[in-house]
Image (tube, helix red, strand yellow):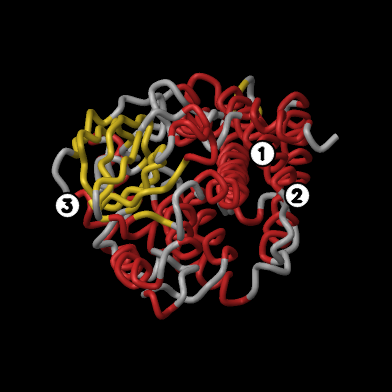
Amino acid sequence: MATLPSEVLGVPRPDWMEDDVAMLEDMASRWLEAEVVPHYDRYEKQEMVDRSAWEGAGAAGLLCASMPEEYGGSGGTYAHEAAIIEALGRTGTDGFGIALHNAIVAPYILHFGSEEQKQKWLPKMASGEMIGAIAMTEPGAGSDLQGIKTTAKKDGNHYVINGSKTFITNGQHANLIIVVSKTDPTKGAKGTSLMVVETDEVEGFRRGRNLDKVGLKSNDTSELFFDDVRIPTANMLGTEEGQGFAQLMTELPQERLLIANQAISMIERALAITIDYVKERKAFGKAVIEFQNTQFKLAELKSEATMARVFVNHCVGEHLKGQLSSTTASMAKYLTTDLQCKVADECVQLHGGYGYMNEYPVARMFRDARVQRIYGGTNEIMKLLIARSL
């Protein structure tokens, strides 16, 4: 019998994984296995998930699970988003960008949007009619969000946006983009505002190339260009200009926890696949699992993964109580993604030459893992944030 990723560590079900959350994870896994996995190789080759898959996810209730029902969501919590995120990891469909859409973009609108904005945008995001992205990174500004150059200048009852963004997840598909902009470049962080661009409604917006990445090939990641893009003043998030940096800082802990959920779910899948492989693979007349080196390596990885899983579960529980600090979220992001890359590397090694073949899932996991240490704030930035707490 195949080793199940959800059982490979033997960690008891956490308190936050209530029955409805567990049922959602099971349903999401089954839907992904049936509707996404059969097409995933094609998505990897075309470097984009079909839009129909987004619409299917919306119909299945996998979009905006944590948004209130009055805005088209399922009325859940971050626990429900975590269940969907981990279902993606355990089915090997990590490149389907619904985690960012659900647990990063939609919460900005819910927490900082006006009632009119929430009524206008969230139901369309829940159905898949609108696909969300957030445009932070620029060619000259990555983890340093205060260094952005994109401007949004007020002109009557409109803002005029000029600038460019890069490495934007869901960038080819997105038709609702939160653009981090400078409304007053002289005020530093306090001059930053978040602007919502509905790409189907404006002129001057261009998508650049779908970027050729090392991994996560099925996730469209793009350059975006804004040339005198006019949006109504009503499309700013917040009650006044200059609130954008504080809004970003409020939401970044959840983004970093999301990345930790992605990491631990892939870790569990990599271990499950590798354990099955070394039990079947023969070398020098015996199964690879019978070699002491294999046993010691897997014992080490399982031990570290178990500690990571317990910590991630703790962080989700703290977040649901509103008590997850930025420091702890940074620890979770940095520790789990470093471990993810270590586990993927060791699992490739235990597969031998076959681990380097793209037809084996562990090869894709090796490639896909690497960016986790970069986006959401590099792990070096995470250490800097943690150091401030000393």
Q: Is residue 22 left or right of residue 195?
A: right
User: In this image, 40 relative to 191: left or right?
Assistant: left
* Cβ atoms under marks 1 and 2 closer than 8 Å: yes
Please, what is the three-letter code of the amino acid marked with disc 3? Asp
Q: Secondary structure at mark 2?
A: helix
The answer for how far apart the CA atoms under marks 1 and 2 are is 9 Å
Element type at marker 1? helix
Residue closer to the observer: 120 or 312: 120
The disc at residue 164 is none
Describe the element under mark 3 as helix, strand or loop: helix
Please say whether residue 3 is visible from this viewpoint.
no
Dot 1 or dot 2: first in sequence order is 2
Q: Amino acid at mark 2?
A: Phe
The answer to whether 339 is drawn above or below residue 71 in the figure is: above
| Mark carried by residue 200 | 3
Q: Residues within 10 Å of mark 1 (few under 14, many from 20)?
A: many
The residues tagged by marks 3 and 1 sit, at their Cα atoms, a distance apart of 38 Å
The quadrant in which residue 52 appears is bottom left
Picture quarter with the N terminus: bottom right
Foreground mark, 2 or 3, reads 3
Which quadrant is home to the C terminus?
Answer: top right
Rendered residue at 36%/43% (across/down): 179
Residue position for label 1? 336
Query: Percent position (x, y) of residue 300?
Result: 77, 33
> Which residue position is annotated with label 2?
311
Of callouts 3 and 1, the N-terminal one? 3
Looking at the image, tell me whether mark 2 or mark 3 is earlier in sequence order.
Answer: 3
In the image, 257 versus 89, the foreground residue is 257
